[in-house]
Image: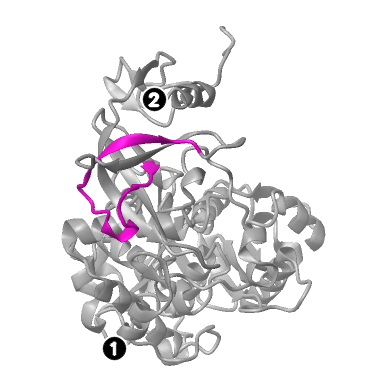
Amino acid sequence: MERIAESPLAVYQAHLEKGELAYQWSPEAQKAVFYPRVICPFTGSDRLEWRVSAGRGTVYATTVVHPARGGAPYNVALIDCDEGFRLMSRVEDLAPEAVRIGLRVKLRVHRPGGEDPAYPVFVPLDSA
Amino acid sequence: MDGLQRGSAAIVGVAESDLGAVANEMSPIDLMAQGIHRALADCGLGLRDVDGLLCATAQSRTSGLGLAEYLGISPAYVDTTILGGSSFMFHVAHAQAALQLGLCKVAVIAYGSTQRTIGRRQASVREYNPYETPFRPFLPSTAYALAASRHMHQFGTTREQLAAVAVAARDWALLNPVAWEKKPLTISEVLSARMISYPFTVRDCCLVTDGGGAVIMTTPQRARSLKKPPIFVLGCGQAITHANISSMPDLTVTGALPSGRAAYAMAGLGPTDIDVVELYDAFTINTILFLEDLGFCPKGEGGRFVAHGRIAPKGNLPVNTNGGGLSYCHPGMYGLFLLIEATRQLRHECGARQVADCETAIAHGNGGVLSSQSTVILGTQATF
């Protein structure tokens, strides 16, 4: 058996550092796989190919979190990417309560700075 | 569930521990032990009769060890399955299997939590998830709010309909002397309460209390010689669909659908045969989703179904007759209390909130963020 040299999360994070949202493709299932893993949840196979998303998607579900200890309310959303996978994220450049299910969005890689890893957020597709 | 026989085990003793805000320095195991002591008294068995031990709490990784030590027993059968608030419905099926196979003769299912006393953050530590945690979802509320957003979008469910679930639960709680909430609640009070994660205000969300309890199960033969009429396990079902909300296949369809289907098939019953309905109402959307997925109304109709008091005390479908996780008690993993209430209703012990002439009940547990679903159908001697 071949030893795994780099964890699925490490590969994913390395793509994000380059400004890319990576996902896996299962050639046997002909389906996208997200989050990244060691074996395919559709077939059990360890044949999974890395692909880079075009970064376009649609809001599937949305909420506005109101922090109990104060602070501004913020959006949390589930985004269906066009390649056929879903992820948790948020929509920026829009008031949190204005985010609607069905809204078309595009990727923006958020870099929190310091030791914190980059993560994918989205903005409305038709924004400048 | 294939392999389990309808009525091959019975619930013979049930009890809550202290609820609400318990004495300082009480431990989850103290509450389990108190619940077990009371539940054994309820059926007339003693600790020395117990040879099957099933338990779960968010506050101990090895509660089976701690509880066995505390009780001074070395059980022949132990199961500490922990899948969130539905764990205890899974325990019923596992206890039934163990009793059916003769692995034990008297099984105890126990729970305890002191999350109100020590704080929810400390009682139930969230695991870091690199694919969700950066977005700061306020879990579990945010996950259920996302499901509610989908239901509102697809089926036109309204915040007022969600609020009707909370009001019905409160109306039942006012009939339950041990319920945490003591004051009436209106739709407008639900809507104007502090927002948590849209569309939920704090009144759409379950309580944060301490509490625990125990359920005693044994074989039908032994059950008939005990203090109270046995309540038979007629059907069990279970389904796991995901762990994290971002991996739930369809946010409007839960694992209650296959879980309920399996339980109904084993029981040889359908939703129209059920007299009392106990559903895990961690959030108002839960009741709506489970009424749909367990077949009490068509998919998408749950919001309209619960409006206008249909599930409230004077409505035509008694749902969450103890006041539910929304108004009675919610120590974090609430499933055990659904089994306790269903059993008491079928024994006709519920006083002001007693459902007339009930012979069958469904107790449906939910765990995680709609992740694990498990259904138990119970019936009196008349149904067995």
Task: Give how far across and how far down residue B173 sits, in percent.
Answer: 45, 85
Q: Is residue A19 above or below residue B255?
A: above
Q: Is there one chain holding both mark 1 and mark 2?
A: no
Side of A119 relative to A107 (left or right): right
Q: Give the extent of the magenta segment.
A: A88-111
Crowding around mark 1 (Cα neighbors within 10 Å: few <14, some 14 to 19, many 20+) is: few
Side of B302 relative to B336 (left or right): left
Q: Is residue B6 visible?
A: no
Q: Quadrant of residue B143?
A: bottom left
Q: Tell me what residue is drawn at x 66 percent, y 72 percent.
A: B35
What's the amino acid at mark 2? Glu
**Label 2 marks which chain's residue?**
A
Q: Are marks 1 and 2 in contact (CB under 8 Å)?
A: no
Task: Give how far across and how far down residue A80 sits, in percent.
Answer: 28, 38
Q: Nearer the viewer, residue A89 or B268?
A: A89
Task: Give how far across and how far down residue B46 sits, in percent.
Answer: 73, 70
Q: Is residue B16 above or below residue B76?
A: below
Q: Extreme front residue here?
A: A128
In the rendered structure, find residue B314 and report the number of the disc placed on it.
Answer: 1
- Magenta highlight on residue B237: no
**Label 1 marks which chain's residue?**
B
